[in-house]
Image (tube, helix red, strand yellow):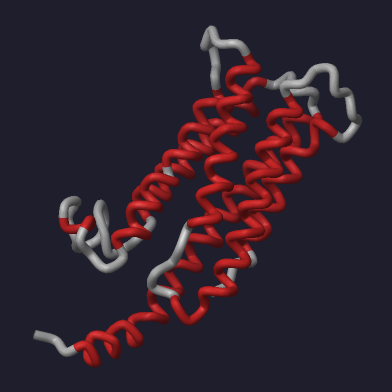
Amino acid sequence: MQSEGAAHADHLASAPEVDAYSLFMHHTVGAWLLVIGLLLLVHRLTGQRIAAYRIGIGAAWVLLGVFLFVKSDPEGWPLGPAGFVESFTMPSRWDWIQHKILAFLPISLGLCAARAHVPVPRSLWIYAAAGLALLGGLAMTVHQHADHPGTYEIINIQHRFLAISALFIAGSLILDSKERVTWRVKPYLLPAGLLAAGLQLTLYVE
């Protein structure tokens, strides 16, 4: 049986690789959010007249969710050496569970954004998307990286900023549903929130 000291040494030896993979995931998601934010900005600048932009934005959200579901946590299911049941008992199981649950948020946002030919009032789609963004923001306030205890504070601070961005996005979505609110900047608040979150993630450090 491996001693506790040996196990700790193995963890330290593998830490750079874990950090590199984590940074890759955060930076990739950040770049993806920047693309979605830019697509949405162009969609708003064109008066939301081109349906292809809306469908493209929805598809980008869904692809992001699938990417997160499959690629997050390289040691766990579905790509890692641990099987589905084994993933619930591995040391990083809480990270794995959180990431799998969070992956469904962009998928749901994508379905809300696309909403092509679905007989549901637009306001309901917006409130559903705002609720998901709010859920994501709340999740960021409790999301932990158990394998990075030495850099907990900097990770914690970045997650708090991401939570603020998610709450800003949720508020922007709710404003979108308020036709009486005619602020000139209102159409651009949501793209700004997505771009801010994307920029934070592309600059993410551990």
The foreground one among 189 and 88 is 88
Of residue 153 and residue 50, the one placed in the foreground of this image is: 153
Percent across and percent down for residue 155 are 55, 69
* Residue lying at 42% horizontally and 81% vertically, measured from the top left: 16
User: Can you give x and y, in whole percent of width and height, for residue 151 in the image?
Assistant: 52, 78
Q: Is residue 1 left or right of residue 21?
A: left
Seen in the picture, residue 91 relative to 114 is either above or below; the reply is below
User: Is residue 176 found left or right of 62 in the rendered image?
Assistant: right
The residue located at (54%, 54%) in the rendering is 140
Instruction: Find residue 93 and report its image quarter.
Output: bottom left
Q: Quadrant of the N terminus?
A: bottom left
How many circles with numbers are drawn on the protein? 0
Residue 63, position as x, y percentages in the image: 46, 40
Q: At x 75% / y 35%, what residue is drawn?
A: 42
Residue 146 relative to residue 92: left or right: right
Front residue (pair 100, 34) = 100
- Does residue 70 sit above or below 43 in this rendering? below
Name the residue furthest left: 1
Q: Residue furthest right?
A: 184
Q: Quadrant of residue 134?
A: top right
- The x, y position of residue 9, in whole percent, is 29, 90
Residue at 71% of width from left, 45% of height from top? 193
The image shows residue 171, relative to residue 76, as above or below, that is: above
Figure quadrant of residue 176: top right
